[in-house]
Amino acid sequence: MGVSNNVVGLSLAMVSGAFIGASFILKKKGLRRAGKSGTRAGVGGYTYLLEPLWWAGMITMLLGEVANFVAYVFAPAVLVTPLGALSIIVSSVLAHFMLKERLQRLGVLGCLSCIVGSVVIVIHAPEEHTPTSVQEIWDLATQPAFLTYAGSTLVLVIALVLHFEPRYGQTNILIYLGICSLMGSLTVVSIKAIGIAIKLTLEGISQIAYPQTWLFVTVAVVCVVSQLNYLNKALDTFNTAIVSPIYYVMFTTLTIVASAIMFQDWSGQSISSIVSEFCGLLTILSGTVLLHTAREQEIASASASGVAWQVDTASAISWCISIGTDDLLKNVEEDYFVALQSSA
């Protein structure tokens, strides 16, 4: 008995989650190093392109994305996308030990909630009807419902980039991640179309001559480049342990919506299965609220411990001045230490 397509898709999605979770940490460390020697990515710098660690993170993410790309060929997006929760666990654990971004008990509970919600979605995921040509996918993409979704997404992205990012990008994490997630939902449907085209071509039914194939490729490239740019800004500006789960929740939700509209994933499903999937999404969102709460408690604890303190010794007076950012626990290495040597 052969392995089913869903099993292959799920296995690839799990491998993808592990690689992508690790890539967050590698890129974050590269961004920190780059920020010490040049302009930070969060304020428009690109010195991270010279950092080997950042490139190691990019290669790891690329491997994860390739595995994810292939997973979408074998399994529906509603089934594959929620397994990205694995990247939350990997990145959070690694950030705790490697970046000293402490994840408290409430944060761990939030992560577990995200995982539980994902499992519920996977269990109740629908069977997918695989299109037999790029032309069929194009017909699905030009439905009024999906055109409305795609048009609304582009309008929101333009508004976020032109109006909200210059004003609130450095203080509101939802700006950068909103852009990433909205573009990501279009990336997934485009990548699924490309994957099906490649699969059909390898089976002897060439899809290369279809102009729609190259249109999907163009959309995917533009969306991926945009995602990477704004994800780098989010990682450089905010705590990795918070960026990963929020990005996952927003990206998963929007991808499921986009896929359901375009590929009609829920067509033919029972009401109980659909309700179960929505309960899974609500569980994931609850996990995100817990992560936010844990984050607020960390900041409050840091503020209560004092912004500045003084230590007197026989030979020196040392001052520790903590910069007044919205991310006090982001990285202790980013604080400024000044030593005033006495002349006694």
Image: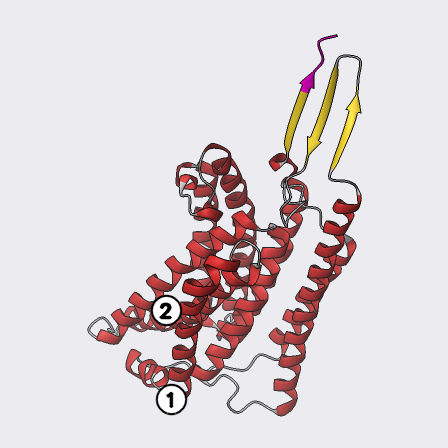
Q: Residues within 10 Å of mark 1 (few under 14, many from 20)?
A: few
Is residue 23 placed above or below 277 in the rendered structure?
A: above
Relative side of 218 to 237, left or right? left
Q: Is residue 129 visible?
A: no
Colour scheme of the picture: secondary structure
From the top left corner, tell me how far across and down residue 75 is, in percent: 48, 73
Is 343 colored magenta in this rendering?
yes
Q: Residue at x 75, y 45 (%)?
A: 302
- Residue 195 included in the magenta stretch of the image: no
Q: Which of marks 2 and 1 precedes in the sequence?
A: 1
Image mark for residue 144: 1
Find disc 2 in the rendering and name its residue.
195
- 23 or 154: nearer the eye? 154
The residue furthest left is: 209
Q: Which residues are magenta?
A: 340-344
- Mark 2 is on which residue type? Gly
The residue type indicated by label 1 comes to Pro
278 left or right, relative to 108? left
Q: Taking the image as drawn, is residue 88 in sight?
A: yes
Determine whether 81 is above or below 237 in the image: below
